[in-house]
Image (cartoon, helix red, strand yellow):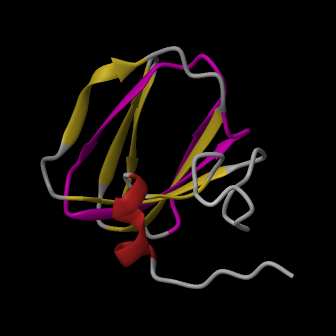
Amino acid sequence: MSIATGNAFDDGPAHRGWLVGTFIEPPDSVANSTDVEIKWGTHAAGEERAEWTTGETRTSMMVLISGRFLQRLPDREVELRRQGDYVMWGPGVVHAWRAIEDSVMMTVRWPSV
């Protein structure tokens, strides 16, 4: 049986916040998965990815854990304000973001590549 424990705040920085995915070592770890990627992201107020992320081949979902966060998509901006608010988009959708307040986000992408 594979088991992993830890703390997302402590373990995340080793892989830019990613806790599960094909890139997690060792390859036989329960956290190494070709099915899904999971990230615990902490973002200071004002932090942003202003340029559009392009060429994405996965489906993505971001869930607000705390704070306020703005997800920019081609046809709209989605403000995540309340704990549990989420936004999901499919492959090929360009996106950018900005933390309105100090924010903690959980991102899930599938499959892991």
**In the depicted view, which residue is nearer to us: 80 or 11?**
11
Q: Quadrant of the C terminus?
A: top right
Displayed quadrant of residue 76: top left
Q: Is residue 110 left or right of residue 61?
A: right
Residue at (73%, 52%) from the top-left corner? 33
Q: Is residue 100 left or right of residue 9?
A: left
| Image vertical order of residue 92 relative to residue 66, above or below | above
Query: Residue 3 placed where, x, y %?
Result: 73, 82
Q: Is residue 83 magenta?
A: no
**In the depicted view, which residue is nearer to us: 47 or 14?**
14
Query: Residue 40 placed where, x, y %?
Result: 45, 62
Query: Residue 37 placed where, x, y %?
Result: 62, 50
Give the residues drawn in magenta, as a range.
Answer: 84-113
Residue at (51%, 83%) from the top-left corner? 6
Query: Residue 68 placed where, x, y %?
Result: 29, 58
Residue at the left extreme? 46
| Image vertical order of residue 28 relative to residue 77, above or below | below
Q: Is residue 55 left or right of residue 95?
A: right
Residue at the right extreme? 1
Q: Quadrant of the N terminus?
A: bottom right
Q: How many dots with numbers?
A: 0
| Image vertical order of residue 101 relative to residue 7, above or below | above
Residue at (20%, 52%) from the top-left corner? 100
Residue at (60%, 16%) from the top-left corner? 92
Displayed quadrant of residue 10: bottom left
